[in-house]
């Protein structure tokens, strides 16, 4: 069976697997009362089923069986243990909240399985900033930091309906294209599998009557897959894709990777900077994320905010792929820094120095309501008696 036929069957199978299992998960979650209770920083106001990401895990495990003949370095044997660790940790965190330290230890253990596989070794940056050879210990440090950053960044953007799904879908479409052109068909099939999962899940996530969240179970799994694909992308060498033609110079791959992941990376860097500036822990919860700004300050709905952020991601990637086809590293670095500084200028003015914006909004409404009642009471007292 050729790649095209396999890709179609994998996508349809993944989509149906998630689409058919999500309703069953919803029923079990509702029956066992494992709902996500809204709190002061939540974007939802009613109890909502979570654990939607559990369907991703089973779908990926089954998909690995059907695409096992497409790999070269038995990558699935190294990916599945890490995937299982994050599934268990995410499941427990959705049911019983875990500390950031516990999740970080689990993530380090999960990515260790991937880093030791020869397929992901980054031996050179192909001339990026005049860097060619990379020692093995430096690869482990860079690769480990990269994977941890991506996993946690994706986990943090899962804050409103549809956002994590849309951003994930955009990233998977781009990586599917890149790995298809570079003839790394195994990784293209992984991206297609994940895309089928996210597209099926998206319909439930934005539904009004069958809503479910992917939870940490899902966001950790998706973030893990994105980090694997990114690591493999950076490990590509000109000889690896033979006669295939990528639409950009391979030496610009690090900047292309940043552009692909710009939404979670920028948002994470922004909220961490604000929290540290406010003398809080970088993982302390608040409503400082970009999607919260779009909803709370600009009055957009969840779907509108998710759509705008997704479109921005696509435009940003297309722009950098065009620049990466000709421009040298220095020009692209200047362009990237300029865009990030511009975005920082726009969004950093929404620096909330209080616990949550929602608290302040509710307090303001309560004060306005009390003022209205007081004025009404005063007017009644002053009304002349006949």
Image (spheres, rainbow, N blue to C red):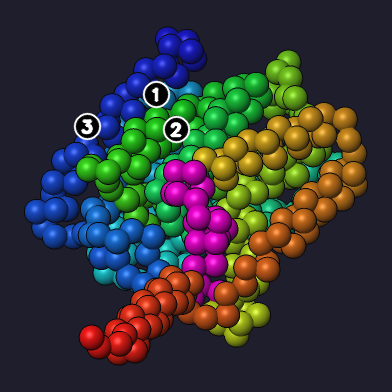
Task: Choose the circle earlier in sequence order: 3 or 1.
Answer: 1
Please name which of the two marks, 3 or 1, marks the residue nearer to the observer.
3
* Quarter of the rendering containing residue 369: bottom left
Q: Which residues are magenta?
A: 282-306
Apparent side of residue 97 relative to residue 308 in the rendered image (left or right): left
* Quarter of the rendering containing residue 317: top right
* Residue lying at the far front of the rendered structure: 386
- Using the numbered discs, state the Cα–Cα distance from disc 2 to disc 1 in whole angstroms: 7 Å
* Residue lying at the far left of the rendered structure: 31
Few, some or many residues within 10 Å of mark 1 (<14, 14–19, 20+): many
Name the residue nearer the viewer: 242 or 3.
3
Judged from the image, the secondary structure of the residue bearing numbered disc 2 is helix
Task: Choose the circle earlier in sequence order: 3 or 2.
Answer: 3
Question: Mark 2 — residue?
Answer: 195
Instruction: Say whether marks 2 and 1 touch (CB < 8 Å).
Output: yes
Question: Mark 1 — residue?
Answer: 11
Image quadrant where one finds the C terminus = bottom left
Task: Choose the circle earlier in sequence order: 2 or 1.
Answer: 1
Apparent side of residue 226 relative to residue 9 in the rendered image (left or right): right
Picture coordinates of residue 69 (x, y %)? 44, 23
Which label was assigned to residue 172? none
- Using the numbered discs, state the Cα–Cα distance from disc 3 to disc 2 in whole angstroms: 16 Å
Few, some or many residues within 10 Å of mark 3 (<14, 14–19, 20+): few
- Residue at position x 69%, y 54% from top? 139
Picture coordinates of residue 257 (x, y %)? 68, 43
**Can see residue 284?**
yes
Which label was assigned to residue 20? 3
Image quadrant where one finds the N terminus = top left
Vertical order, 117 against 155 (above or below)? above
Picture coordinates of residue 59 (x, y %)? 32, 35
């Amino acid at each position: 069976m050729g790649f095209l036929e396999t890709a179609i069957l994998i996508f349809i199978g993944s989509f149906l697997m998630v689409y058919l299992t999500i309703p069953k998960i919803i029923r079990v979650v509702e029956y066992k009362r494992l709902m996500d209770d809204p709190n002061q920083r939540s974007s939802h106001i009613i109890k909502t089923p979570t654990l939607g990401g559990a369907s991703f895990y089973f779908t990926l495990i089954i998909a690995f069986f059907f695409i096992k003949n497409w790999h070269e370095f038995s990558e699935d044997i190294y990916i599945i243990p890490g995937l299982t660790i994050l599934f268990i940790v995410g499941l427990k965190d959705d049911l019983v909240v875990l500390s950031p330290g516990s999740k970080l230890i689990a993530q380090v253990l999960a990515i260790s399985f991937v880093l030791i596989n020869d397929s992901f070794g980054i031996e050179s940056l192909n001339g990026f900033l005049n860097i060619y050879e990379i020692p093995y210990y430096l690869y482990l440090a860079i690769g480990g930091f990269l994977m941890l950053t991506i996993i946690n960044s994706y986990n943090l953007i899962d804050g409103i309906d549809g956002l994590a799904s849309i951003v994930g879908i955009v990233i998977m479409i781009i990586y599917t294209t890149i790995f298809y052109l570079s003839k790394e068909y195994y990784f293209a099939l992984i991206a297609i599998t994940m895309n089928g999962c996210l597209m099926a899940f998206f319909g439930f996530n934005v539904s009004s009557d069958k809503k479910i969240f992917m939870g940490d179970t899902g966001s950790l799994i998706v973030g893990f897959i994105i980090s694997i694909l990114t690591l493999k992308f950076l490990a590509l060498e000109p000889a690896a894709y033979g006669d295939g033609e990528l639409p950009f110079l391979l030496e610009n791959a690090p900047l292309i990777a940043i552009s692909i992941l710009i939404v979670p990376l920028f948002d994470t860097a922004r909220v961490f900077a604000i929290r540290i500036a406010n003398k809080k822990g970088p993982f302390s919860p608040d409503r400082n994320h970009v999607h919260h700004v779009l909803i709370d300050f600009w009055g957009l709905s969840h779907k509108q905010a998710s759509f705008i952020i997704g479109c921005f991601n696509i435009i940003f990637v297309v722009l950098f792929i065009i620049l990466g086809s000709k421009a040298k590293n220095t020009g692209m670095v200047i362009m990237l820094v300029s865009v990030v500084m511009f975005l920082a200028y726009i969004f950093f003015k929404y620096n909330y120095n209080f616990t949550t914006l929602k608290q302040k909004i509710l307090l303001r409404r309560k004060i306005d309501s009390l003022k209205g009642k007081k004025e009404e009471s005063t007017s009644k007292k002053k009304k002349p008696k006949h």
